[in-house]
Amino acid sequence: MKPNSDIKLLAGNSNPALAEVISSKLFRPLTDAKVTRFADSEVWVEIYENMRGEDVFIVQPTSSPANDSLMELLIIIDALKRASAGRITAVVPYYGYARQDRKTAARTPITAKLVANLITEAGADRMLTVDLHAGQIQGFFDIPVDNLYATPVFAHYAKEMLPSDQRLMVVSPDVGGVVRARTFSNMIDGDLAVIDKRRERAGVVGEMDVIGDVAGRTCVLYDDIVDSAGTLCRAAEALIEQGATEVHAMCTHGVLSGEAVSRVEKSALKSLAITDSIDQSGTRDSTKIKVFSIGPMLAAAIDSIARHDSVSRLFKKAPTS
């Protein structure tokens, strides 16, 4: 990738490590700016470089603490708008509130749409994200949205771990994720199984049935988000009970809230692969969790957007340089 001097990169506090990876791949330093707090926890942003007419990319996943991360993003956008930035792209690798993408009961919000409105009204001109929980969220925005996928990153890893005489059995942990799992299965020339789960209530899963013959197979549970990891660990147990020889998991966004990391360590999972779309400093001591960087992919996408080039080429392979 050739250096592009027309790009300005600015990072919030949500995932500075990922911002540094993107910065190194683009050969562009992060913009000199301060995102801090007043004594009462209000967000304060100050930018120390000229932004007039610049093509600016803000790296800020809206992960935990979700509300703080979101407010940082909105205020950074506002600061850039008032500094007469030429174009503002919100680079939000993990889009918080994405699971609230429809009314699931009477008198409930569609918060994914509300957040889209907030980002747009704050002044963003476009958004770059990775593995939206639901594709229709792109339609919640009235600005262009580039939704990248982590499948090429995981496909490279899956082929490395794959025994030469076997096809991996890719397993969707629920019916809603079948399209995502099938896409990944086709990419690695694997087979597909599905777990039919019944939720008792939000966050609590009842019975699980495995649809597909997993006996004697190496299985990969494939999903976009792992939060508490309860469902994932139970799914691994169900696959082992059905005769799977070993079970791995690959999830783009490692939310890993509460006791998720220790739950994974004690589970039947042999490994859990996630990306650095969310800061993963809390997983360093884990023996099972492997973190893969999407920084090179995001850097390539940013470079393509800045040069008005195609972004869709990144769906086919994982950029490494």
Image (cartoon, rainbow, N blue to C red):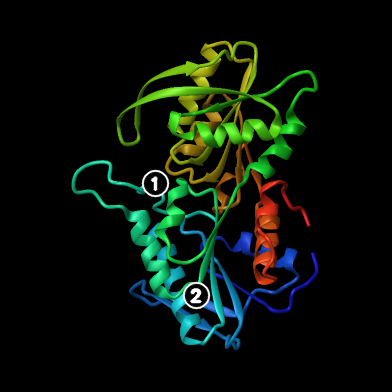
Q: Toward which corner of the image does residue 151 lie, by quadrant?
A: top right
Task: Please indicate whether residue 255 sits to the left or right of residue 99 in the image.
Answer: right
Residue 65 seen: no
Quadrant housing the C terminus = bottom right
Q: Circle 2 sits in a helix, a strand or a loop, which is it?
A: strand
Position in image of residue 267 (x %, y %): 52, 26
Of the residues under marks 2 and 1, which one precedes in the sequence? 2
Residue kind at label 1, given as amino acid type? Arg
Task: Please indicate whether residue 273 sits to the left or right of residue 158 in the image.
Answer: left
10 Å crowding of disc 1: few (<14), some (14-19), many (20+)? some
Quadrant housing the N terminus = bottom right
Q: Circle 1 sits in a helix, a strand or a loop, which is it?
A: loop
Position in image of residue 210 (x %, y %): 48, 17
Task: Please indicate whether residue 106 sits to the left or right of residue 148 in the image.
Answer: left
Q: Which mark is residue 99?
A: 1
Do the residues bearing badges 2 and 1 touch, measured as CB atoms within 8 Å? no
- Residue at (73, 39) in percent of width and height: 156
Label 2, on which residue?
35
Position in image of residue 28 (x %, y %): 72, 73
- Residue at (37, 55) in percent of width and height: 112
- Residue at (35, 48) in percent of width and height: 100
10 Å crowding of disc 2: few (<14), some (14-19), many (20+)? some
